[in-house]
Image: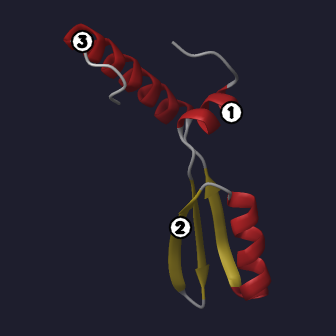
Amino acid sequence: MADGSPEDLAREVATEARVRWSRRGEHFVEATTDETEFVRQLFAKHGEEIRDLDVRRASLEDTYLTVVRQHEDEARNAALGVEGVA
């Protein structure tokens, strides 16, 4: 169903990462497709005020479930004669 390293598959399947951080006691979460640039901008804007930084991409389990769901959707659509519907 899929071929590649876990990291490559996660990047291919789950294009967004979740960035969590706190600043002055307030907690934030942001979804981004370019977590490196987002974190750079975050530190450029807020510097040492940033605490509890956590960047997470899809886990291997999340990636597996997404790949299986996509495969099942494609099979279902093929059985129904529907093309190009995800």
Q: Position of residue 48 (x, y in %)?
A: 78, 85
Find the residue positioned furthest to the left: 80
| Local secondary structure at mark 1 | helix
Rendered view: 62 above or below 20: above
Closer to the chain start, of discs 3 and 1, is: 1
> On the image, numbered disc 1 is attached to which residue?
7
Query: Label 3 neighbourhood size at 10 Å, few (<14), some (14-19), many (20+)?
Result: few
| Local secondary structure at mark 3 | loop
Q: Position of residue 4 (x, y in %)?
A: 68, 20
Quadrant where the C terminus is found in the figure:
top left
Is the C-beta separation of discs 2 and 3 under 8 Å?
Answer: no
Closer to the chain start, of discs 2 and 3, is: 2
Kindly report the distance in space between the C-alpha atoms of the residues bearing marks 3 and 1.
Answer: 33 Å
> On the image, numbered disc 2 is attached to which residue?
30
For residue 78, side relative to residue 11 (left or right): left
Find the residue positioned furthest to the bottom: 24
* Amino acid type assigned to the residue bearing label 1 in the image: Glu
Q: Position of residue 23 (x, y in %)?
A: 61, 85
Q: Position of residue 74 (x, y in %)?
A: 35, 18
Q: How is the image coloured?
A: secondary structure
Kindly report the distance in space between the C-alpha atoms of the residues bearing marks 2 and 3.
Answer: 38 Å
Closer to the chain start, of discs 2 and 1, is: 1
> On the image, numbered disc 3 is attached to which residue?
81
| Local secondary structure at mark 2 | strand
* Amino acid type assigned to the residue bearing label 3 in the image: Gly
For residue 46, side relative to residue 25 (left or right): right
Kindly report the distance in space between the C-alpha atoms of the residues bearing marks 2 and 1.
Answer: 21 Å
Q: Nearer the viewer, mark 2 or mark 3?
A: 3
Q: Nearer the viewer, mark 3 or mark 1?
A: 3
Query: Label 1 neighbourhood size at 10 Å, few (<14), some (14-19), many (20+)?
Result: some
Residue sitting nearer the eye, 62 or 68: 68
* Amino acid type assigned to the residue bearing label 2 in the image: Glu
